[in-house]
Amino acid sequence: MTIEDYFEQPCWVIDPLPRQVPADSRGKYFAVEQYLLRGPHREALAHRVVRFLLKLYCYQPLRLFWPDTEQTLEAPSPEELADRVFTCLTGRRPAALLVLLPEAEALLTLDEDDLNLTLYHPSAELLELIRPLAMSEGLFLRQPREAR
């Protein structure tokens, strides 16, 4: 499956919020998102995501891919994984990072401008694994309304 093929597949969100915010929230979500994407709050979220991915790495091989440079890192060490994810999520370059789970045939996307990760093409078994790993870091796995 190519990277583009993943984006055509069903997706799930791994998010600090347990449910999607209602459309009539009058922009509160975007104000809160911008607040949480600044300074120490951004770093705290990045640390949570790094710990989640390190835990997932214990169960699944991961491959990192940067869409802007098409650079790939096969089987990163835990230190490389943590450094690359933290660098992306704290607003340093690159701005986006794709995490391929080749054995599970799934894809996670991370972007410096988002509070959440998006998981494409997960199997039921992968969802069963990811849900408690995410919750252990105060993150929630949910399917977006438009994907249902």
Image (tube, helix red, strand yellow):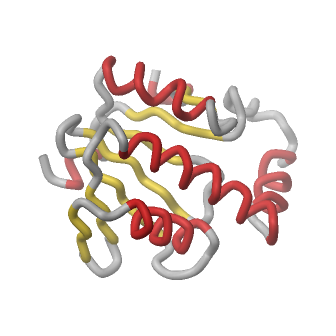
Q: Residue at x 29, y 52 (%)?
A: 62
Point 52% across, 47% down: residue: 117
In the displayed structure image, the side of residue 40 where residue 133 appears, left or right:
left
x, y percent for residue 6: 26, 45
Residue 75 or residue 49, whichever sits in front: 75
16 or 52: nearer the viewer: 52
Count how many numbered circles sit on residues in the image. 0
- The structure residue drawn at horizontal position 69% and vertical position 27%, both measured from the top left corner, is 19
Q: Position of residue 87 (x, y in %)?
A: 54, 74
- Position above or below: 20 against 2: above
- Vertical comparison of 123 with 101: above or below: above
Q: Identify which residue is drawn at 62% across, 40% down.
A: 15
Q: Quadrant of residue 79?
A: bottom left
Q: Position of residue 106 (x, y in %)?
A: 28, 40
Q: Is residue 35 left or right of residue 66?
A: right
State the image coordinates of residue 134 (x, y, percent, origin top left): 56, 34
Picture quadrant of residue 138: top right
Up-down relation of residue 58 to residue 71 (above or below)? above
